[in-house]
Image (cartoon, helix red, strand yellow):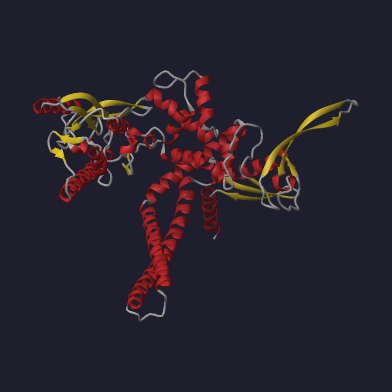
Amino acid sequence: MAERVYCLYRVSTSKQVDHDDQNQADIPMQRKACHEFAEHMGWTIVHEEQENGVSGYKVSAADRDKIQLIREHAEKGKFDILLVFMFDRIGRKAEETPFVVEWFVKKGIRVWSVNEGEQRFESHTDRLTNYIRFWQADGESQKTSIRTRTALGQMVKEGRFRGGVAPYGYYLEKSGIISKRKHEVNKLVVNDEEAEVVRMMYSLCVSSGYGRWRIAMLLNDKGIKTRNGANWHESSVGAILKNVTYKGILRSGKTYSKPFKELQIIDPYTFDLAQKLIEERINEKNDERTAPLNTSGQSLLSGNVFCGHCGGRLVLTTNGKVVKLANGESKGVKRIRYICYNKTRRRKECDGQTGYTMHLLDDAVTQLLHQIFDRMSAASDNLIVGSTQERHMVELRAEIKRIKAENSKANTEYESLKSEVIKAVQGKSKMPMDVLSELVNERRDKVLATSQQLTELNAELEHSNEKAEEMKNELSRIRTWSEIFDDSDMEVKKMVANYIIKRVYVFEGYKLNIELNLNIQQFLDGIDSVTENKVS
């Protein structure tokens, strides 16, 4: 009776940048080779299984349905031989695959490869040979993975699209570049119609404070469909709001390209501001949040207003109040107030007011915003930016000098402690080894941390010209807001107020202590510096 054979075929992925001869063995070729081999050996193939796009290196055998099915059939004695094109089709994990193969052999199943013959476990030499084979396959997988990542990273650095479907807002066009596989490479081109929708999403997020769900609902209400003609879902909107491609940067894993102007749909400033707003709305960051979670409603402040007495957040409350009119009739009016959450809920002692009338507090903050707008309109862009940038550069150089000193001190202490460890090993140190080890680790971490800080600060210093251009764009945006603020909807006013004001602390009698966002404060400091110089 002919021996019964199960065949397993596998390809790691349908698209690979670099192929070796083994990985190029696609399913039809593996099947043909196995059938010819079985016929030559006089065996009968009774069943075949194939895995498409399953990595034998990344995916454990326990998570591969086909392997588990074949093991189940082996337990029931449904076949005698497991045949593969090469043993690495079973897997490439050095710490796992040899034992998977040995399991089959222990169950009485002979495991054969068309190219490598039968896998035996009759001696220690067999086991060692088996382990070495899969260890080599494991290494090849890692090298292939590195080559793939490197090649994809190089592609995006050169501005070439790494493959797949073009993101919404773009379409694919032939580039004229021929790949190693003799295929013409596609490039991304901005789709003007879709790009307008992307810009609308970012504008709603940044200028009006809309979240993903609200943006999706608005697009659907307007009859704007996805590329496939379907309604928008909040997850699709969220993906678009986080995709760096829209500011002209291509990405592959941890590799990012330089910005390509021709691919830029959203300017970097707007993109980064959108990320900040999205991040601040995460529930886990509720204590630090200053961005309004909801821009609907008629209150100007939401999320960034606090009690000056206890530090608790002020929240909105609405209640009715009956007033008597001049003609003697009574009328119910709605009263909206900011109230101290700590005081009303008795969560914390608070000696301030329980609440503040909404329109009185909002009017006071609006007056402050107008004062800021007026001050920024009084001086020229070049004077404000130049002075602000000069102050920033002075502060930056001072910080670099301070961190350099910290780094030098940490390095000296680290080297000294390492010498002390050698003395401890020789029995010449009075300090216990465990204490020394902890101190060495602390100093090493300090050296690494300060070195990283220095790298970042020096990079910021090198890009000072780019920073100046960003500041001009930011100043221009603020001035535009000053012109439209009074005529804007409340949701726009809220976002402008949130952008300028970090926190508002309210004290009894409507006294305010307002903390501005750092960039706004830097602009005002720059204006003060210009004024002081003129006076002197």
How far across and down, in percent of the image, does residue 352 sit? Answer: 75, 51
Residue 17 visible in image: no
Q: Where is residue 33, by image quadrant?
A: top left
Q: Is residue 284 left or right of residue 6?
A: right
399 versus 327 height, above or below: below
Total numbered labels: 0
Q: Quadrant of the N terminus?
A: top left
Q: Nearer the viewer, residue 385 or 178?
A: 178
How far across and down, in percent of the image, does residue 234 sit? Answer: 49, 29
**Which residue is located at x 25 percent, y 46 percent?**
94
Q: Nearer the viewer, residue 163 or 25?
A: 25
Q: Nearer the viewer, residue 30 or 439?
A: 30
Q: Is residue 73 left or right of residue 39?
A: right
How far across and down, in percent of the image, does residue 242 sit? Answer: 43, 36
**Which residue is located at x 51 percent, y 48 percent?**
519
448 versus 21 height, above or below: below
How far across and down, in percent of the image, does residue 143 sit? Answer: 22, 45
**Which residue is located at x 22 percent, y 39 percent?**
105
Q: Is residue 24 left or right of residue 319?
A: left
201 versus 315 height, above or below: above
